[in-house]
Amino acid sequence: MDGEIDLELYTLSIIRLNSAFEKLENNESIEDVEVMLKESHKDLNNLYHDIVDDLNQDEININEYYLFFANGMQIFPQYIEVLKGIEKIELSDTVDSLINVFTNLNKIAEAFPKNEMIK
């Protein structure tokens, strides 16, 4: 990556994830839900690895990370809880993988400096 979070990828992943939850709630095709969850996992996992790589670089856009993780500290635990509530056995591997990615993102968010943003 280039020292900035791919917010477009993150947004699309979250939209896809929310759509999968809606389809699941409406008892729509489990196969469609699984595809959407897998795509979200792939994108969020790539984003996680990009973030880890970025945070290990000398130059990053630190302000963007403050905002991302401030939001994430509220959002990530909510997604973890929703995912833990999914009881469809055929989705368990994908759901577990998504829980893992959100848990990893949340760990970074919790460890990220809580200082004021750099101006």
Image (tube, rainbow, N blue to C red):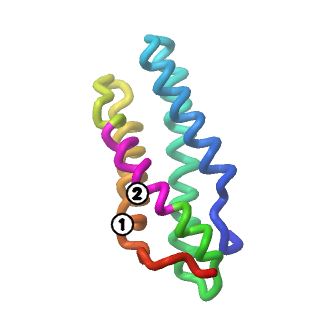
Q: Amino acid at mark 1?
A: Glu
- From the top left corner, tell me how far across and down residue 100 is, in percent: 36, 51
- From the top left corner, tell me how far across and down residue 101 is, in percent: 42, 53
Which of the two labelled residues, at mark 1 and mark 2, occupies the earlier sequence position?
2
Give me the disc on residue 110: 1
Kindly indicate whether the residue at mark 2 contacts the one at mark 1 (C-beta within 8 angstroms).
yes
What residue do we see at 48% from left, 62% from top?
A: 69
| Element type at mark 2 | helix
- In the displayed structure image, the side of residue 87 where residue 38 appears, left or right: right
Q: Main secondary structure of the magenta part?
A: helix
- From the top left corner, tell me how far across and down residue 88 is, in percent: 32, 23
Of the pair 74 and 53, the residue shown nearer to us: 74
Which residue, given by chain and number where applicable, does mark 2 sit on? 73
Magenta residue check for 1: no
- Point out the image quarter for the C terminus: bottom right
What residue do we see at 62% from left, 45% from top?
A: 11
Q: Which residues are magenta?
A: 69-81
What residue do we see at 66% from left, 74% from top?
A: 3
